């Protein structure tokens, strides 16, 4: 368990950026924490590291660094993003107990998300027979998810440069309205798949499952916020109404077109 405490301490340290500005708990603190945790995992288990682990940790490192830098640059350059970022709900000071609860919850979630690869390595070090093909599968699925997210962000940025006031329905956005969130769900699905070949104990399954459910919840919550925000801006546009009726919200080809009515997704 000592390795989990080390990872939690690191996660707390990086996500503490949220004490500077609350939204950073979930944004740049998240991205940089995932990068740091991937590196720390490789170092802690360097004696039993395998090539699929190297690939997987590299994918997470690139993902986290890219996300953190992307959000920082968007904050500096995008007026529309600044308007969203500095909404009252993001700038109002929270009571100290709430700040601690959010900080600790985020740090625990980030460790839970990356835990499958740590369990794979811990059990491998303990002499258990792990399945390397599940590790490779998880790494490949995660890499595809990161690629989708990167392409989606690039396509959105390009579309907004052409017309900043129009919703994006080109490229991957023709298939799904939140392809960046789908890419992230896919990435963490790849992470969770690693458990199936890691000889996980019951408590390891619990930690990994809570981490996976937690990030999927966060992604659907983010998609709900985007849906509500877009409804305010584009709700009277017939073309937009036609777009959202034919295009799934977050999972391609799965006809979930709206989650706005689900108040329990508010995070």
Image (cartoon, rainbow, N blue to C red):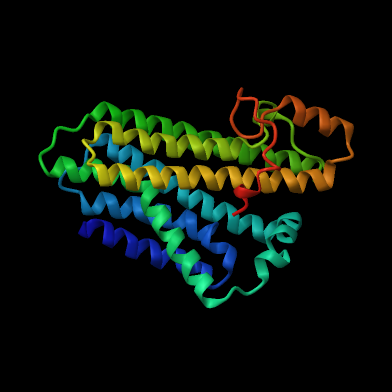
Q: Residue at x 82, y 27 (%)?
A: 242
Q: Is residue 264 left or right of residue 58?
A: right
Q: Residue at x 52, y 71 (%)?
A: 99
Residue 233 position within the rendered picture, expressed as x and y whole percent measured from the top left: 83, 47
In the foreground, 190 or 49:
190
Q: Looking at the image, which residue sits at the far bottom?
A: 96
Residue 244 position within the rendered picture, expressed as x and y whole percent measured from the top left: 76, 31
Q: Residue at x 47, y 47 (%)?
A: 214
Q: Quadrant of the C terminus?
A: bottom right
Residue 156 position within the rendered picture, expressed as x and y whole percent measured from the top left: 68, 40
Q: Looking at the image, which residue sits at the far top?
A: 253
Q: Quadrant of residue 133?
A: top left
Q: Quadrant of the N terminus?
A: bottom left
Q: Is residue 13 left or right of residue 251?
A: left
In the foreground, 84 or 96:
96
Residue 196 position within the rendered picture, expressed as x and y whole percent measured from the top left: 29, 31
The number of discs equals 0
Image height of 75 relative to 238, above or below:
below
């Amino acid at each position: 368990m000592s390795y989990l405490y080390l990872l939690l301490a690191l996660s707390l340290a990086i996500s503490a950026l949220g004490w500077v500005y609350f939204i950073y708990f979930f944004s740049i603190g998240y991205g940089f924490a995932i990068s740091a945790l991937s590196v720390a995992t490789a170092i802690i288990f360097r004696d039993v590291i395998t090539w699929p682990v190297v690939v997987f940790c590299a994918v997470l490192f690139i993902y986290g660094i890219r996300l953190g830098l992307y959000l920082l640059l968007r904050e500096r350059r995008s007026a529309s993003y600044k308007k969203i970022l500095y909404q009252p709900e993001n700038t109002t000071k929270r009571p100290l107990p709430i700040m601690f609860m959010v900080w600790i919850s985020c740090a625990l979630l980030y460790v839970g998300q990356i835990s499958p690869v740590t369990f794979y390595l811990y059990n491998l070090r303990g002499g258990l027979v792990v399945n390397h093909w599940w590790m490779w599968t998880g790494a490949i699925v995660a890499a595809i998810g990161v690629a989708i997210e990167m392409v989606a962000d690039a396509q959105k940025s390009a579309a907004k440069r052409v017309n900043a006031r129009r919703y994006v329905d080109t490229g991957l956005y023709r298939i799904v309205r939140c392809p960046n969130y789908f890419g992230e769900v896919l990435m963490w699905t790849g992470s969770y798949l690693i458990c199936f070949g890691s000889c996980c104990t019951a408590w390891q399954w619990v930690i990994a499952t809570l981490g996976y459910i937690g990030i999927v919840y966060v992604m659907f919550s983010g998609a709900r916020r985007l849906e509500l925000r877009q409804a305010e801006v584009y709700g009277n546009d017939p073309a937009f109404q036609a777009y959202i009726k034919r295009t799934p919200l977050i999972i391609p080809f799965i006809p979930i077109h709206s989650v706005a009515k689900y108040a329990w997704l508010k995070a």
